Image: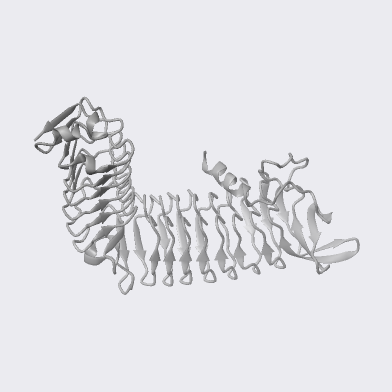
Amino acid sequence: MNSSKTLLVVLIATLIPALSFAYDFKEGGLCYNINKDGKTVTMTYENLIMFAFDAPAPTEKGYKGNIIIPETIKHNGKTYKVTAVDRGTFSCNTDLISVVMPKSVKNIGKETFMYCPRLKEVILPPSITEISDYMFAESGLQNINIPENVKAIGNYAFASSSLKSITIPSSIKTIGQSAFSGCRWMNEATMSNNVESIGEAAFSICPSLKTIHLSSKLKEIGSKAFYECSGLEEITIPASVVSIGDGAFSNCHGLKSIKVQEGNSKYDSRDNCNAIIETATNTLIAGCDATVIPYSVTAIEDEAFVGCNGFKSIEIPTSVKTIGSQAFFYCKNIKELNIPNSVISIEERAFCGCDSLETVVIANSVKSIGYGVFLHDDHIKTVTIGSGVTSIGGWAFKGLDSVKSITSKIENPSSVKMGENVFDEIDKKACTLYVPRGTAASYKEAPQWKDFKNIVEQ
């Protein structure tokens, strides 16, 4: 399913229920509802063209071309001021080109310009205080001037639109979830020094984004905020930041420099390591191709190195005790992996997608190997499993098409808690399982281990 269809499916639960044709009057080709005060009106849709499973097909086309909303409108001898634009008013109008709104408009509803592919320009009134949820999602809008009174950008506000750049004014403090997600042509984002929060996945999947200027007052960066921004080459975390979510910079293939400003109380980039480290816990939460993991680091966080394709080997220092979920997911060029004799647990899919990996040595200190840790790493030829392992998650070694030998140092294989299909899709006839002296009989009786046809003591 492509991103457009996915976004529309997500919207189904939030859209205005059922197709509606109700409006109080129509003047100058535009439709209006009279507000409760009897003096003002809200511009609305003639036919709401939304994708909903229970909606009948529209009988008339929506708004098209260039629309200018008047500040006042006369109807039946009475003059009304236009103060709002209804939710979804222009959504799914495929022939809409531009809209100019008067300064009298103070409120603009959600999804107003959602899925307007030919939309080129919208002049927003200076009086609005929010860019609402999904307002320009899936639109053809390339540029927008956000008024200075706007304090927040809503969830999915510009998601998958055609924006080429964005300047966020000083009035804005929060950027919502997935606000600019999927803006594939956006190459620059500049925010004022008043932005305090960047929501989850706010700038995710913006591969053309090369420059991002973070606010000096920024406090929170949501999980996957810049996920798959492959054009980013450097990032500097301001001293004000106190919260960074999981995978905030994962799959940013182009990152060459990642630093934390001095004076940050929560994070650091000690020893010029080109990584973000949570100071109190010594946990590395985000790295890049140029990262050198300091020997003071005790944990590698979930998704810390996702998509880092620039290194062929990675030195994990003996200070590290845990390797998080998907920590090295899709690091395609690592050829050799030595888990040091300090690591206790390797979480699920930590090295999944490492297509060039040929040799894996897991130290005796490791107790837990998570689900799918080496799933479909089909160039692995040899694996050594340390003696301390007490649990192996399902599919941990599934799909190792090229593996020639697995060396297990485990003395009692029946004591190991095994997930489902740990060795699934390995050729059990071609792969030799080497085991400690005097344990072959135990391996030949232990579930899953016994499937190997060549079990050899050494």
Residue 33: image quadrant is bottom right
Say if 399 sits above or below 120 in the image. Answer: above
Q: Is residue 115 visible to us here?
A: no
Position of the C terminus by quadrant: top left
In this rendered view, identify the residue nearer to me: 427 or 95.
427
Mark count: 0
> Which colour style is shown?
one colour
Q: Residue at x 58, y 64 (%)?
A: 146
In the picture provided, is 190 more to the left or to the right than 327? right
In the picture provided, is 72 more to the left or to the right than 200? right
Residue 342: image quadrant is bottom left
Place of residue 216 in the rendered image (x, y in percent of width and height, measured from the top left): 41, 71
Q: Residue at x 64, y 62 (%)?
A: 124
Place of residue 383 in the rendered image (x, y in percent of width and height, measured from the top left): 19, 39
Say if 188 sits above or below 429 in the image. Answer: below
Residue 60: image quadrant is top right
Place of residue 337 in the rendered image (x, y in percent of width and height, measured from the top left): 20, 45
Place of residue 388 in the rendered image (x, y in percent of width and height, measured from the top left): 18, 48
In this rendered view, identify the residue nearer to me: 296 or 182.
296
In the picture provided, is 303 more to the left or to the right than 60? left
Q: Is residue 333 visible to us here?
A: yes
In this rendered view, identify the residue nearer to me: 100 or 406.
406
